[in-house]
Amino acid sequence: MSRIGKKPIPLPSGVKVQIGTQLEVTGPKGKLAVPIPSGISVQQADGKLEIKRASDDTAALHGLTRALAANAVEGVSNGFTKELDIVGIGYRADIKGKVATFTLGYSHPIEFLLPEGVDLKIDKQTHLVLTGHDRQLLGQVAANIRALRKPDPYKNKGIRYTGEALRKKVGKTGATAK
């Protein structure tokens, strides 16, 4: 049996669950839907969700479905955050409404449209805090922002996750004497 799949998911107060062809989770932060594959069943009892599987053929989907459901419950109750840092002289970010503008050393500023359900807060023009209730969407938006200027291992410039370890490489030492 899947160790992750058999763990029950506690439902916090204020979170409502509707079970059908998909699991619809509604809470104070928003609403999410998790698909339920065939061979997997979801039961609600005593303020907990339990994910069961019919046979060992769906063992891989058992833990996956439980993890997606747990992320949905956590997202609609508490939400998720991702933090990014912009490192480099003259590199900065600004936000107006749902459009973030990045100055990253290119000849032009880059405008990034934030999707619905993801909020961006900027501290000191170089520290970004992304918040949202959908974990997958939040991670994808953070990865797309990081891809605008990936961290350079030679100059240590670029956009990186807060706390991301980046090893600095040494550059060329010049032509050697023959």
Image (cartoon, rainbow, N blue to C red):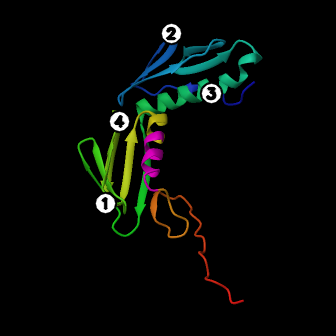
The numbered mark at residue 20 is 2
From the viewer's perspective, is 32 left or right of 8? left
User: Is residue 29 on the magenta stretch?
Assistant: no
Residue under label 3: 64
Judged from the image, the secondary structure of the residue bearing numbered disc 4 is loop
First in sequence, mark 2 or 4: give its number: 2
Q: Position of residue 52 (x, y in %)?
A: 66, 17
Identify the amino acid type marked 3: Leu
Q: Nearer the viewer, residue 103 or 141?
A: 103
- The residue segment tinted magenta is 140-149
Q: Do tag 3 and tag 1 residues touch (Cβ < 8 Å)?
A: no
Query: Is residue 132 something that shows in the picture?
Result: yes
State how many labels appear.
Answer: 4
Q: Are marks 4 and 3 in contact (CB under 8 Å)?
A: no
Q: Quadrant of residue 153?
A: bottom right
Neighbour class for label 4 at 10 Å: few (<14), some, many (≥20)? few
Q: Which residue is found at the position 38% from the left and 46% from the top?
A: 130
* Earlier residue among tags 4 and 3: 3
Amino acid carrying mark 1 in the image? Gln
State which tag comes first along the sequence, 1 or 4. Answer: 4
N-terminal of the two: label 1 or label 2?
A: 2
Circle 1/circle 2 CB separation < 8 Å: no
The spot of residue 115 in percent (x, y) is 35, 35
Identify the residue position indicated by label 4 in the image.
115
